[in-house]
Image: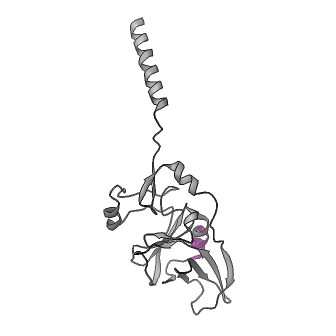
Amino acid sequence: MSKFRAAAAIGLSILLSVTSVMPSMAARVYNADTNTWEEPSVAKTRNRGGSPIKRETIEYATNYKPGTIVIETGERRLYFVLEGGKAIRYGVGVGRDGFTWSGSHRITRKAEWPGWTPPPAMRKRVPDLPAYMPGGPDNPLGARALYIGSTLYRVHGTSEPWSIGQAVSSGCIRLTNEDVTDLYERVRVGSLIVVKH
């Protein structure tokens, strides 16, 4: 019996010494900007701070009705039209070269902490993408999503505030999680959304 205990103690000490030397294998996080998987510690270094473009209420002359969303991709700004010639202006990230688009649609659905099903074209470009990612802080759609008509595009959050003001997405319009949560509370299903390029 003492030989068994000695062998078990030696085996356990070897196992502990090997695992303490091996790097920890934490779950990796998908970075939609680079279409790669990365360690959570790398993602966290980018997630510090808020949007480089602060949300503000401004004077805004337009013929669009209050409640309309107007996105000026060239400005990297989203305007939520208010009464009295005003709008709330948000900083956004937009589609990178080859993924830009424009048009008018309606918001057809809203979701909190939405799950993400990468479209087939994206999965073809990035074969190791999962078929589905449940909603949560590591999901590329962030805290809220507004679905645009029957398109593949959404206005959604991101936990990567450094990407606001940049052309980095695959066509979706992204805001910080804080800003998209604010917008989500204001927008109704059926609201007009106009994307200008």
State which quadrant residue 10 falls in.
Answer: top left
State the extent of the magenta-drawn residues as a range: 181-190
Position of residue 66 relative to residue 115, above or below, is below
Q: Position of residue 197 (x, y in %)?
A: 48, 84
Q: Residue at x 58, y 89 (%)?
A: 65
Q: Is residue 94 visible?
A: yes
- In front here: 60 or 1? 60
Q: Where the N terminus falls, by quadrant?
A: top left
Position of residue 104 relative to residue 31, above or below, is below
- In front here: 197 or 141? 197
- In front here: 144 or 176? 176
183 falls in the magenta region: yes
Q: Position of residue 25 (x, y in %)?
A: 45, 41
Please name the predominant secondary structure of the magenta segment in the image: helix
28 falls in the magenta region: no
Residue 141 horizontal side relative to residue 164, left or right: left
Question: In the orientation shown, which residue stands out farthest toward the bottom?
Answer: 63
Residue 149 horizontal side relative to residue 174, left or right: left
Q: Residue at x 53, y 56 (%)?
A: 137
- In front here: 52 or 108? 52
Position of residue 67 relative to residue 36, above or below, is below
State which quadrant residue 66 falls in.
Answer: bottom right
Q: Residue at x 63, y 68 (%)?
A: 52
Q: Residue at x 45, y 46 (%)?
A: 27
